[in-house]
Every structure is written in structure tokens, then in C-alpha cells.
Image: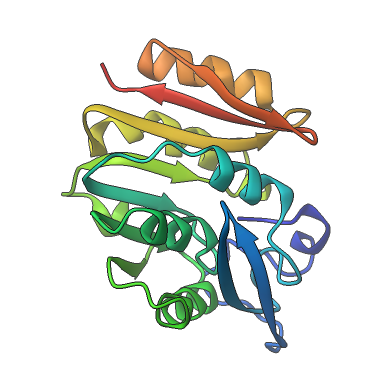
Amino acid sequence: MLNSKDSQTNHYFAPKPKSKPKFGLIQTMLRGMPFKFLTASGVFSKKHVDLGTRLLIEAMVLPETGYVLDMGCGYGAVGIAAAKLNPKIHVIMVDVNERAVRLARQNIRLNNVYNAEIRKGNLYQPVEDERFNCILSNPPVSAGLAAVKAIITDAPKHMTEKATLQMVMKSKIGGKRLQQIFEKAFGNCTILARESGYRVLMAEKK
């Protein structure tokens, strides 16, 4: 997950952030449940759960059971919320940023979540042999369209039948273009939610 303002000097998609970590703690409510997230400089949205992430969490449709992937998890808000909302699923969170990975691991413990884990790596590399019932993503927009497109186009290879890909995106930054990429990759795309300049797109593997 990325913030375009900070990305000029400290890319959140870099494996090793160069900035000295300055830690913070977010306490917030998501879907009626309390959460705490340890954050730091060098990871996305360290002061609050950003609007896009919040919209994805509020709108996401989780499977009753099975495996869920949080792609580009940052400090873990989406994946941890999913795991807490449904203890019957197992959530795997992935990020290339080693600082984000450490924070997500701490936040799993901080929120008393027992059905989630974190793996470090680029895109689907850490889960290349696994299949998921749901993939969630607030993608690394500042990494470029190619990286975001890869999350979409490579997703079907990592999904079970009738699994969904759910992605949040600023409507003004490629929202319509990504909708076309969804359509090409899956043959379908719906707008699951739209608010505050963001939209959550969802496609189902037929």
C-alpha cells in the first residue's frame, strides 16, 4: 500500500525502507470491532487507517471458510480485520517491505488473531503454489500500473473456483482502466462499493 506524497523519497514497495523508523499506534473501529495497529515511518498511512483501506474493509465479502490472501498488506489492517471478522478462514498476508512485515506480525499478536500469518516477498511469489477463496488488495499504485495489473492478471492462477478478487482504487487513478483489466482477466467486474473518491472492484473466477 502506498502514499504518493511520501513515495517520492521512501517507496513503501521497497524491500528495505531507508528512513529511520518512527513508531506510532492507531486505535480504531472497523465494522463495529476495535483494533490496534502498530505503525512506523516507511510504511503506508502510518497515522490512520486510510480511506481506501477502510472502504475495502467495510465492503469486503469474505468466504465462510477457506483461505484468504491480503496482497500488499502493509502493517496488516485488511488481513487482520478479515481474520478477526471470520475465525473460520485462514488469512495469509504478503508484502515486499520488511518493515511492514515485522509490523504486521506484531499486529497479529496485538489484536489476538490466531488465524493469520505474514510472509515477505514480491506479489504472488511467497504463495505461488497455493490457492485462495478470496484475494484482497489495496495495491501499490506508486509502483506503477504494471505491478497493479500483475496482481489482477495473475490472480486467477491462485484462486479456487468461484473465488473473488476485491481491490480498492482511487476512482481518478485508473479506476475505469482497472475495471477493464478486471473484465479481461475474469470476464466480469462489479463495483462493490464507492465512497470518498474510492471504489472497490470485485471479480469472480467462473
Q: Is residue 197 above or below residue 205?
A: below
Find residue 75 and report its image quarter: bottom right
Q: Nearer the viewer, residue 90 or 169?
A: 90
Q: Which residue reaches farthest front?
A: 32
User: In this figure, which colouring scheme has been used for the structure?
Assistant: rainbow
The residue at 48%/39% (across/down) is 60
Quadrant containing the N terminus in the rendered view: bottom right
Q: Position of residue 141 (x, y in %)?
A: 65, 44
Left or right, residue 4 beside residue 130:
right
Quadrant containing the C terminus in the rendered view: top left
Find residue 8 and report its image quarter: bottom right
Left or right, residue 171 beside residue 150:
right
The residue at 63%/62% (across/down) is 29
Left or right, residue 65 beside residue 69:
left
Q: Is residue 136 above or below residue 28?
A: above
Q: Which residue reaches farthest right?
A: 5
Q: How many marks?
A: 0
Confirm whether residue 15 shows in the render. yes
The residue at 21%/45% (across/down) is 65
Q: Position of residue 110 (x, y in %)?
A: 47, 82
Q: Position of residue 89 (x, y in %)?
A: 26, 53
Q: Nearer the viewer, residue 41 or 166?
A: 166
Find residue 80 and report its image quarter: bottom left
Q: Position of residue 22 (x, y in %)?
A: 72, 88
The residue at 52%/42% (across/down) is 147
Q: Which residue reaches farthest top?
A: 187
